[in-house]
Image (cartoon, rainbow, N blue to C red):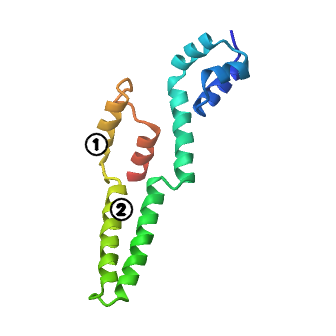
Amino acid sequence: MKDVKTKERFIELRGQGLPLAKIAAEINVSKTTLINWERDFREEIDNLQAVELEAMYDKYYLSVRKKVEFFGDVLNRIQGELETRDLSTIPTEKLFAMYAHFYREAQHALPELTFRNDDEIRIARARRLPSSDDSSMTELDSLRFSHKS
């Protein structure tokens, strides 16, 4: 049986997206064992992959926040330039087209905002975590309750 540190290293490397063959060579564990570990630690691996992907999104300006900031900045600059233009010139028409294009792109980049009350949050959590006991208060619920009192 392999030690915990070896399994943790496997999860870390798999979370980084390394292939099983490369991981097997690095930590000296058979590919068959790694396949079993992949199944056993699927959630941990998925979480690490999500963290890695989020970092890449941020690095390459693909996060929602970065997209909104980018489109907002471009729209503000175009709008500022439009305000200085005579609207009868052809370049202004092109500028309006650019503005319309970036406005549509910004609308697509914006996430749909969903606000939930406490009951809706509890229902959504129960759907997502069906094995959790609905009646027990979570740490967050007890914090909310103590602040309302």
Where residue 19 sits: x, y (%)?
60, 25
* Whether residue 11 can be seen here: yes
Q: Which of label 1 and label 2 is nearer to you? A: 2
| The quarter of the displayed image where residue 123 is located | top left
* Whether residue 149 can be seen here: no
| The quarter of the displayed image where residue 120 is located | top left
Q: Would you call the spot at circle 1 few (<14 residues within 10 Å), some (14-19), or many (20 or more)?
A: few
Residue 106, numbered label: 2
Of 43 and 84, nearer the camera is: 84
| The quarter of the displayed image where residue 110 is located | bottom left
Element marked by disc 1: helix
Which amino acid type is shown beneath numbered disc 2? Ala
Q: Residue at x 41, y 42 (%)?
A: 141
Task: Determine which residue is flagged by label 1.
Answer: 120
Counting the numbered discs, the total is 2
Of 127 and 80, nearer the camera is: 80
Element marked by disc 2: helix
| Sequence-wise first label, 1 or 2 | 2
Classify the position of the N terminus by image quarter.
top right
